[in-house]
């Protein structure tokens, strides 16, 4: 019934699967027929502390009963507390601006870079270099910042000033007098779970610093402990000028953040958001960070990463005809599947066996489980996934 309603009233911008999930707990989901699923996707890396996390939902309920909204023309206590927590946990000397999504956080990053370029040096600098297989969002400018040209069909004209490098090595040759910023993901998510080389990234960071060009790291997917540290930037031991965050921060409430070391870049009126940094989402995100910091400090996160890694390695060994290799970092992982058709089959068969997995790029089976996934949930998920591999193999 809801499938019909959905099809009649929702624009068809997603290749939607019509299962109707009605509740979740940890890394488990249940549909309206009470079938259970193991969730190796957490949305797309959103539900980092698990579905229906009690500490997060208690904070949301408590806040909803007190106050939900005043404009950003007033102090919002949980926004201030969340900003302090994010900055202190990151170890970077930054300030935050709160938005509502990853794309919007990246819009903020682009505006920071453009203003920096306006105020620092002659001629005015405005160009942002990104990578060919990047993904930075769906708004007009973040779509243009996204280097996958196939996604630019239909929607032009776009704003000027975006340049695409084939890879990190190629960036230097594209720098000119108008370049103000380089924006990269440290592990490309949508592009195929592709980690950048640490030495190359560190060399790039050094080069950009010497040329007074800003380094913006899009941590919308890699951020909030997804790669094992609060930010992948910490793991890569670099000091970006700008970091953007969104997906895993709110456990499902819409939140985006742009953080920068250029603490005085904006003056009142330069940037804003009606909903950004509201009470409800910042209370929720504060709890997410508390939970994950404790989890990381106790060794739980590293243990979960290792456990998941070993299960993936076993799959690679068991199905060499189907899997090329394992890719990714932390709990942002992928299996390179031999071809696109096999990948589609695997995802369909996995769903039929009640385990949720994602696709990335053309040939990557992607895993973004809740960071707090238990060993029992991992075991059950891989049991079902192995069954999916078996039936795909014979099919
Ligand atoms: C998902 C994603 C975005 C876009 O985030 P939205 O919240 O969908 O706007 C931007 N950058 C990266 C790296 C992402 O993975």
Image: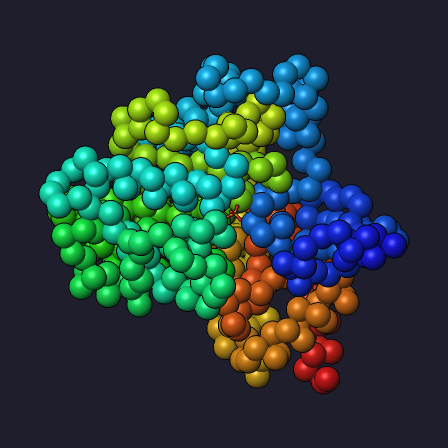
Does the rendering let one see residue 129?
yes
Q: Residue at x 61, y 79 (%)?
A: 341
Q: Position of residue 385 (x, y in %)?
A: 68, 67
Question: Along the line of sight, which residue is nearer the eye, 104 or 12?
Answer: 12
Q: Position of residue 87 (x, y in %)?
A: 38, 30
Q: Residue at x 27, y 41 (%)?
A: 114
Question: Along the line of sight, which residue is nearer the eye, 6 or 39?
Answer: 6
Query: Quadrant where the N terminus lies?
Result: bottom right
Q: Position of residue 205 (x, y in %)?
A: 23, 50
Q: Image quadrant of residue 196? A: bottom left
Relative horizontal placement of residue 269, taking residue 113 as reference (left or right) = right
Question: Along the line of sight, which residue is nearer the eye, 197 or 182?
Answer: 182
Q: Residue at x 66, y 26 (%)?
A: 60
Q: Is residue 38 above or below residue 231?
A: below
Q: Position of residue 122 (x, y in %)?
A: 11, 43
Tally the marks: 0
Q: Image quadrant of residue 135? A: bottom left
Does the rendering let one see residue 386?
no
Q: Residue at x 81, y 56 (%)?
A: 3
Q: Is residue 171 above or below residue 258?
A: below
Q: Image quadrant of residue 379? A: bottom right
State the residue lying farthest toward the front: 157
């Amino acid at each position: 019934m809801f499938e019909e309603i959905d099809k009649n009233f929702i624009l068809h911008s997603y290749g939607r699967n019509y299962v109707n999930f009605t509740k979740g707990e940890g890394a488990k989901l249940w549909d309206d027929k009470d079938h259970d699923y193991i969730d190796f996707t957490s949305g797309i890396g959103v539900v980092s502390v698990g579905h229906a996390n009690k500490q997060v939902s208690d904070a949301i309920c408590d806040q909803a009963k007190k106050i939900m909204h005043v404009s950003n023309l007033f102090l919002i206590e949980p926004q201030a507390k969340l900003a302090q927590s994010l900055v202190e946990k990151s170890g970077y000397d930054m300030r935050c601006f709160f938005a509502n999504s990853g794309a919007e956080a990246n819009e903020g990053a682009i505006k920071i870079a453009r203003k920096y370029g306006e105020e620092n040096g002659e001629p005015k600098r405005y160009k942002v270099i990104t990578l060919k297989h990047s993904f930075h969002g769906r708004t007009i400018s973040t779509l243009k910042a996204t280097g996958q040209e196939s996604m630019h069909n239909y929607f032009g004209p776009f704003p000027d000033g975006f340049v695409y490098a084939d890879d990190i090595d190629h960036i230097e040759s594209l720098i000119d007098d108008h370049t103000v910023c380089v924006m990269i993901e440290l592990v490309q998510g949508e592009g195929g779970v592709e980690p950048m080389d640490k030495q190359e990234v560190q060399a790039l960071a050094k080069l950009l610093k010497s040329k007074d060009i800003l380094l913006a790291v899009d941590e919308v997917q890699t951020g909030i402990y997804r790669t094992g540290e609060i930010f992948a930037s910490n793991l890569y031991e670099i000091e970006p000028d700008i970091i953007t965050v969104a997906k895993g921060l709110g456990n499902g409430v819409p939140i985006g953040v742009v953080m920068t070391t250029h603490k005085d870049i904006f003056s009142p009126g330069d940037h804003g958001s009606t909903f950004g940094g509201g009470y409800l989402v910042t209370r929720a995100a504060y709890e997410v960070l508390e939970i994950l910091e404790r989890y990381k400090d106790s060794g739980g996160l590293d243990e979960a990463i290792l456990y998941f890694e070993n299960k993936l390695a076993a799959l690679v060994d068991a199905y060499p005809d189907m899997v090329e290799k394992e890719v990714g970092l932390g709990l942002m992982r992928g299996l390179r599947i031999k071809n696109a058709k096999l990948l589609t089959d695997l995802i369909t068969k996995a769903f039929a066996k009640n385990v949720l997995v994602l696709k990335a790029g053309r040939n990557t089976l992607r895993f973004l489980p809740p960071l707090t996934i238990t060993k029992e949930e991992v075991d059950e998920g891989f049991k079902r996934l192995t069954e999916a591999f078996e039936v795909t193999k014979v099919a």
